[in-house]
Image (tube, coloured by chain):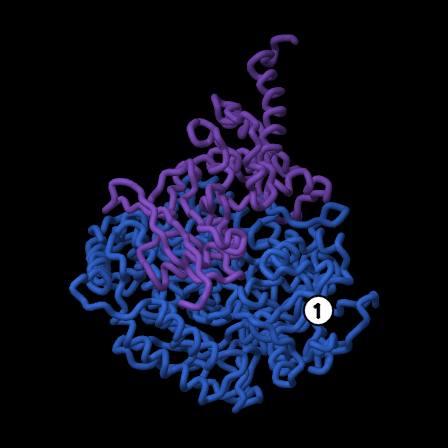
Amino acid sequence: MAHATTHEHDVIIIGGGGAGLRASIAIAEENPDFSVACVSKVYPMRSHTVTAEGGAAAKIKPNDSLEDHIYDTISGADWLADQDAVEYFVHEAPTEMIQLEHWGCPWSREPDGSVAVRPFGGMKIERTWFAADKTGFHMLHSLFQTTLKYGNIVRYDEHFATRLLIDGNGRCRGCAAIELRTGSVRAILGKAVIICTGGAGRVFPFTTNGSIKTGDGMAMAYRAGVALKDMEFIQYHPTGLPGTGILITEASRGEGGILVNKDGYRYLQDYELGEALDVNDPRHPQKRAMELGPRDRLSQCFIKEKWAGRTIETKDGHVVHLDLRHLGEAKIDKKIPFVRELSRNYAGIDPVYKPIPVRPVVHYVMGGIDVDSNSATSVPGLYAAGECACVSINGANRLGSNSLTELLVFGAQAGRHAARFAMDNPDYDVSELEAQAEDEGARIRRAWFDTSRKQGERIVTLRTELHDAMEGGAGIYRNADSLQSACETVADLRERYRNVTLDDHTNSFNTELTAALELGSLIDVAESMAHSAIERTESRGSHQRLDHTERNDDDFLAHSMAYHQPDGSPPRIEYKPVTITKWPPGARTYGAGSGLKGEDR
Amino acid sequence: MSTELTMTLEVFRYHPETDSEPRFQAYEVPYDEDWVVLDALNWIKDHVDGSLTHRWSCRMGVCGSCGMMVNGDPKLTCAVFLKDYYPRPIKVEPLVNFPVERDLVVSLDGFMDKLEAVKPYIIRGDVNDTSGGEYLQSPAELAQYKQYSMCINCMLCYAACPVAGHEDEFLGPAALALGHRYNKDSRDQGQAERLDVMLVGEAIWGCTFVGECTVVCPKHVDPAGAIQQAKAVGAQEFFKRFVAPKGAGV
């Protein structure tokens, strides 16, 4: 590790995915005199936004309403979303989506040239914009390419941020980051910082998330004293390919695909999700019903079918079938071509002729870095947006196609607020921050490059145990015993992490070092998940307790707040009330006639 | 593992801090018919040799990180299976035509500069205003550029191109296809600005239409077609600008 070098900008953005790029553009456009640093451990176009398939929700059509989008989101969230944040999100969504259209995103179109929309799970009406079934890919590349217009966005590609730098006044003023090419630790300083590092699906073994989704930003904020909020809420997407965990988009059901068990029976009708209309019925697929129910419910139904012995056993575990055959080749190729490509390449199935084997797969973390409705954390000058943040609009269960829109709405908002903070708080002491970065470089050297240490455990050993503990203990259904066991394993891994040793003690592009640092992030994030889950003795949305099966609004209409303990003891869990504006908690119903607002029911 | 099937990966190794020149290292890996080449590389890194260095993320063929030479052909290693090669050994090397940083990791510096050079963003004369709603674009207009927007920047086409390797001025298949994508977008008015870049020297004219870029593209983008179309537009423009400039009274 070479010594720290210092780089100064106005705002520092950690993460170059959808949220980070949108934040970068917001600042660069509105503050042409500002210099914006975009720090990412990969090149921006490799960011995980790239894999999102189905679409992005925003009211654009005259038959839709903002009210309906708000209600769908709040009820989908099982009333754990903050309603002021949801209202802001839904109101801003159309403008942000049109903006991205103006920036060149190749949205699929209606014959009249307007943007096309498709139905999505838990949404009362079709409002999901899409670019065939590579929506995230097109959004990410459109955003990235648009950033190239701005001379004041400075990219730090392949820089792995390891620590937030906080000045003597408690304000966040940058990060320490390893430049992968050289291994040197840089101090990247600015007047405000936004974390946009995405999710942490890699805490689990079976996930749609790419290898980079290790919760580094969440862990950095957690260590800096910011609470991780609602971390017990982890989304299992109901349709992943067995073996690889590759996502088969919900759009396949939005276009009319059906889920059947080993008997060819549409089992969702047995779980209060409505009536199984014939696939040729013009009302199929029915919104907010059956295959277009919310993801948490559908994944839970799978487990119940499995318990009842009605799933299909394969060498990669139990599956059900996603049947698209009735859609026909032309529609599949036009609307969901990537589904066909992925199924053929990775499952050896052509969905035109055969049903696709699928099973629930960890997809998204509803929780994240606690931010207020201005995307600000409790540390002045530190903001967060995208999956790493928890505003919360997603509550206990995110609706499909809200997260891509969230990147835009809150990426832009975080950018504007961080820029304002930077203008109002311009002065900091460079030398104290440089000293912190120097310390960080020395800490990393001591922890990982000490060749006199005896051979310890390998990264993969701990990572595998973490995976087993979290899948076994904190999966779709949990109870006190399973969660206690997960908490204990995570605590044990935290101890043993100190004894992990590396084969590689060189500087240039040391990806074994970054894997070790990522493992540290995973352990921190897993700790917050397991402890938040054991404390929440109710069932809500994606958090289902076999020992506390009912929702309990009296005690738990509240966000969990996990605080890291520097001494290594378990996190302190506190609660913060949910903001309710106009939609008091109600029964969460799906099937025919669902989706009526509280006062209409 | 003695009773299990195995196969051999011969992996290109080079470390700038310790190696004066590249070498190959053979690793025996478990054979699993569901494994892609990337799975085998990850297994080596996890279990045998933590110093083996390669890039990857999505392992579903869309992030563009894991392009390498597999038995001499540019491939996404997340999309080629061990079973396609078994039981013969597989040789894995970094993408050719790029400087090697370490092992299987190549430098993207030149590639990123070329992407940026073609101004890959919407350029318009009017003020950006979202209040009027979306720009209308018919499905037919979308189809004009859609396939050229599918590039994942995996750079396999540069590894396949006989010109990209030795002609620095040549912008290369992916960058030219991207410039062409925006030129063909009905919402864009920036073609003239882009042609300023594309028509200079060997930037586009370097292409000798070998067409290997299109053959290796994992996303069926057809950069060769894009380059031929762009050259045709460029030839007209070249004529207008330099042979028969405005006012010359053709």
Residue shown at 57% from the left, 74% from the top: A317
Left or right placement of residue A166 versus residue A390 in this view? left
Give the vertical position of B95 relative to A127 (above or below): above
Left or right placement of residue B202 versus residue B16 in this view? right
Give the vertical position of B43 relative to B102 (above or below): below
Residue shown at 43% from the left, 70% from the top: A203
| Disc 1 residue type (three-letter) | Lys
Residue shown at 71% from the left, 66% from the top: A323
Q: Chain A colour? A: blue
Give the vertical position of B244 relative to B207 (above or below): above
Q: Percent position (x, y) of residue A291?
A: 70, 71
Q: Residue furthest bottom?
A: A547
Q: Residue furthest right?
A: A281
Say which quadrant the C terminus of chain A sits in.
Answer: bottom right
Residue A562 visible somewhere in the drawing: yes
* Element marked by disc 1: loop
Q: Residues within 10 Å of mark 1 (few under 14, many from 20)?
A: many
Q: Percent position (x, y) of residue A508?
A: 28, 49
Q: Residue furthest front?
A: B3
Residue B125 visible somewhere in the drawing: no
Q: Chain B colour? A: purple
B133 and A469: which one is in front? A469
Left or right placement of residue B233 versus residue A556 in this view? right
Residue shown at 64% from the left, 51% from the top: A131
Left or right placement of residue A534 versus residue B184 in this view? left
Answer with the quarter of the image where residue A477 lies.
bottom right
The residue at which mark 1 appears reads as A124
